[in-house]
Amino acid sequence: MNLALPVLVPVLPALGAAATLAAGKKVPGLARPLAIVPVAVSAVLALVVALQLGTGQTLDAATRLTPTGGPDISLAVHLDGFSSLISVLVGVVATCVQVYSTAYLKEDPRYPSYAALVSLFTAAMFLVVFSGDLIVLLVGWEVMGVCSYFLIGHHWETADARSASLKAFLVTKLGDVPFLFGIFLLGADVHSFRIPDVLAAAGEGRLGHPTLIALLLLAGVAGKSAQFPLHTWLPDAMAGPTPVSALIHAATMVAAGIYLVARLMPVFLQSGAALVVLAVMAAVTMIGSALCALAQDDLKRVLAYSTVGQLGYMAGALASGDREASVFHLVSHGAFKALLFLAAGVVIHAAHTNSISAMSRIPGLRKRVPDAYWTTGIALVALAGLPPFSGFFSKEAVLTAAEHAANGEALTNGLGPASGVPQAAGWIVLVSAGLTALLTGAYATRLFLVTFHSPAGAAAAAPEVLPAADRATVVADHEADAPYSPELDEADPATAEPPAMRWPLWVLAVPTMAFGVAGLRPDWLPALLDGGSLRPTGVTAVTGTGLAVVGVLAAYGAWRSAAARLATGRPAPAAVGRVPEQAGAPAAEVIVADPGRTLLGPLFGPARHGFGVDRLYHALFVRPVAAAAQLVRFLDREVVEGYVQGSGIGANLLGRAVRLAQTGNAQTYLSALLAGVVLLAVLVAV
């Protein structure tokens, strides 16, 4: 293989970012081609690299970047089936996002800087995927964090965007600090930062501190991949533009943590304690986020909590020792979650609100956005893990991995002994993943029915355009107690969605429907990865699908019951083309029509607000830090500055006293001199 090809994959988007930033303002017509073409070419090159590398092959190349006095830092490339597969995912999703953004942010004056940051974000993820040196990987890791700060805060004129971007940056950096120490300790143990050297040392059992290294690395993974307890930044990140959400949630930032653990899986297999910690972290994340998703009113926050839960699935597969299943679900999830977010952008564009309760009262919304309606349905079926779409196969691979780990037969595929995976980790993942499958089916069904099939929305035919006054009503028409992350309106709903916002949906719908079958034959996807089996077992397939179906039916039954109560207790339907206004806060019709309230009961309120984790962190960390800052400010201004000012005042007073003695009278000076001489003589005599 020509080494220039994998090198160009991250370089081209980086050059495109620089060119877009330099020329975008001066020549606006060049901004869109400069944003799309380099990323699209990188996607094609990533596919070419994957095809040339083939299955079961690896490529390592390195040149020393700088000596350090210890382990050298190398500019290295490490390619195998995992990096090839994920690079293709990154390229496809990033290209779809760039194309989609040309229409979604058509009138945005800051589009050139936005597009440049998306390209740089993509380049950083390519660097993480292809890097063969942990320090260079860390550079891409941190560049993604900086880009996410600017992209989430794209609408910096709003308080929500500013606080969300700052929160994302600080929470992820909280995990990055121990992550950095973990990399340093790993380099010290192996005497190299090269990934092949690390894997060889781990396989030979030459790591001196495997548990400590694994736990330190997991802190960074928890931050980047939004796992408990550092998951709180991701739902608030919905204040950024919707295409950014698709990029972050599907193929880049949150995938980086999972990819890193998969890449360093032999290291984690050296520590059973770290795998149990990872399993517990995944279990809490899966169940908690699924409950939260079932209670959200903001469409994008539902998808955000869904992402957190699906990342928990991937982490659970890693805790079970099977990185194949984890990466299988990562790629499958990347396709259908990018599709869900881009389809959500189309729906938000048409409804001018993020609130699904407000969308439920827009007559004929599904007829207004047929492409988004059908592709959302496809993606939600995949999310729920129902056959025959990709989510079914990848979810069942995770359940199968957990089942084998629970039986003491972990599918490590030769990366380490099966006995290195504690059975407790397998049981924790298996039980929590089953419960999450049920909850996922429930919130996916709730989202689809409330958004597109509410009786309020079906009361009239679809209006082509909502009056401006009614659009304002819809924007304000969300439940008052619900967390809400609205975007600035980027498009005029008076016009239909342009093709640039529609065809990426169908491009992503293809892998959403078909990618799962790649795991059925051992000479397809398994041959590209570790060679293990990705076929679901009969027990897990029946159990997992059955639980998902129970969740779907429970949500459907609750929705029908709520719809029946709504039909008997709600006011007369509004006129065609008008969005009914709410009376009171919150409106009774919203409360009654939401099946999530019926399913969660007393848990609905806590789940809607993330079970108070943010409030707990505010009480435990934010308030003490703010109080300490106030104390430091007081000490600096009143004590330290007081001493500084006091020394200045003392010097000033001394100067004034000396100045009083300087009268200019020679007799006074001689008298003082004589008095001093007499005084000294007396002192000497005595």
Image (cartoon, rainbow, N blue to C red):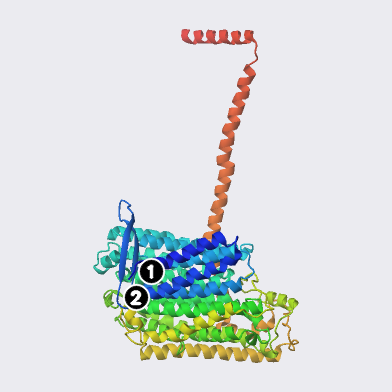
Quadrant housing residue 300? bottom right
Residue at image location 59% in from the left, 76% down from the top: 345
Question: Circle 2 sits on which residue?
Answer: 52
At label 2, counting other C-alpha atoms closer than 10 Å, the crowd grade (few under 14, some 14-19, many 20 or more) is: few
Looking at the image, tell me whether mark 1 or mark 2 is earlier in sequence order. Answer: 1
Left of 332 or right of it: where is 560? right
Residue at image location 58% in from the left, 89% down from the top: 558
Above or below, 290 relative to 214: below
Left of 366 or right of it: where is 46? left
Task: Identify residue type, mark 1.
Answer: Leu
- Label 1's element? helix
Task: Identify residue type, mark 2.
Answer: Gln
Residue at image location 38% in from the left, 61% down from the top: 136
Front one among 292 and 574: 574
Front one among 639 and 329: 329
Residue 579: horizontal and vertical position, in percent?
A: 72, 82
Residue 150 appears in the rendering:
yes
